[in-house]
Image (cartoon, grey):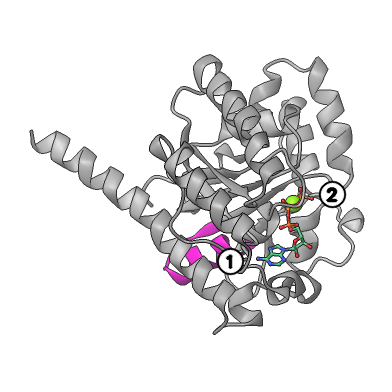
Amino acid sequence: MEKCKVIAITNQKGGVGKTTTTVNLGVGLVTAGKKVLLVDADPQGSLTVSLGVKNPDALDVSLSSLMQSVMEDERLSGNAIIKHKEGVDLLPSNIELSGIETGLFNVMSREYVLKNAIEGMKQNYDYILIDCMPSLGMMTINALVAADSVIIPSQPNFLSTKGLNLLLRSISKIKRQINPRLKIDGILLTMVDNRTNNAKTIISSLRSTVGENIRVFRSEIPFSVRAAECSLYGESIFSHDRSGRVAAAYAALTKEVTLIEERAKNRSGSDRVR
Ligand code: ATP
Ligand code: MG
C-alpha cells in the first residue's frame, strides 16, 4: 500500500462539526475507494457513539488501552479496531481516555504517544482521520504530532472566526517545535445557513483574509437537521440522506481532499523527472 496520510480534524471550539466531518469525510473516502481508519481522540466518545457503539464505556479495548500499552512499552493484547458497516474502521474511545490524558504529563516523550500507538496501523490504510476533542490540551497536541495535516471545521460566526487565530498559532507552534511536516489542508465551513446575511458576510471576509494564506474549502456544509440525525442511527449522511444537500457537500469535500494528495504526488513525480 502507498503512503498513509494522517489528518487531524481539529478545533478547540466545541460543537463546530468535527465529529460529523470525521464520519462523513471518512465514509466519503471509502466510497472513493480508499482504506480508512477513524480514531476517536475525545474522551466524550462522540465518534464512537456516532458510529453505532451504544455504550463506549463497556468496551474492553479502546484507544486508551493502546496508548497505555505504548506508555508501558508493552504489546496490547486484544484488537481495539471495530469494523463499521459502511466500510470505515474505528479505533474507539471512552471516558478512560481522560485518565490517559492526565497521566501523559509524567510520561517520557508524552507528545508522541498517539503517534506511536497508530504507527503500526498505517500500513493498512490510505487515510487515518483523528477526531480531536474541543481543547488544545495534551490529547490534541498528541493528535497534531501524529498528523501529516489538519482540517479545521468552523462555523461562520464572529466568535468562531476569532477563535481560529488561537488555533492557527498553536498549530504553527507545534510545526516549529515538534512536527515540521504538519500542513493545514484547509478550513471547512460547517452548519452554513446561507439565508442569513451575517453568515454570507463572515464567509466572504474569511475567504478574502485568512483565505489568502490558508485554503478555505470550496465545499461548505449546509445546516440541516438530517446531518444532526445521523448519529442517532449510527450511520453517515450517505446512508441516512443520500440525495440531500449535506451528502452532496461532503462528497464534494472528499474530492477536494483527495485532490490535495494527487497534486502533491504529481509535484513530487515531476521533481523526480527534473
Ligand atoms: P465537540 O466539540 O463536542 O466534539 P464537534 O465539533 O465534534 O463537537 P459535532 O458533534 O460534529 O461537533 O456537531 C455538533 C452538533 O451539531 C451535533 O449535535 C451534530 O449532530 C450537529 N451538526 C453537525 N453538523 C451539522 C449540520 N451540517 N447541520 C446541522 N447540525 C449539524
Ligand atoms: Mg466531537
Rendered location of residue 135, percent (x, y): 76, 35
Up the image or down, 120 lies above or below 78; here it is above
Q: Give the residue at mark 1.
A: 194
Quote the CA–CA distance across marks 1 and 2. Answer: 30 Å
Numbered circle sitting on residue 43: none
Question: Quick check: is 32 in the magenta stretch?
Answer: yes
Q: Is residue 78 above or below residue 99?
A: below
The mark nearer the N terminus, 1 or 2, is 2
Q: Residues within 10 Å of mark 1 (few under 14, many from 20)?
A: some
Tell me which residue sits at (54%, 14%) in the image: 177
Badge 1 vs badge 2, beta-carbon distance below 8 Å = no
The quarter holding residue 110 reads: top right
Characterize the magenta stretch by its predominant secondary structure: helix
Q: Residue at x 74, y 40 (%)?
A: 66
Residue furthest to the front in view is: 197
Q: Residues within 10 Å of mark 2 (few under 14, many from 20)?
A: some
Is label 2 within 8 A of ligand 1 (CB to nearest ligand atom)?
yes
Question: 4 or 255: nearer the eye?
Answer: 255
Looking at the rendered structure, the kind of residue marked 1 is Asn
The residue at 58%/72% (across/down) is: 246
Where does the C terminus fall, quadrant-wise?
top left
Q: Position of residue 48 (x, y in %)?
A: 77, 58
Q: What is the residue that sits farthest to the left in this orientation? A: 274
Q: Nearer the viewer, residue 45 or 184?
A: 184
Q: Between 208 and 25, which is closer to the camera in this rendering?
A: 208
The residue positioned 81% from the left and 30% from the top of the image is 101
Which region is colored magenta? 23-36
- Identify the residue under disc 2: 44
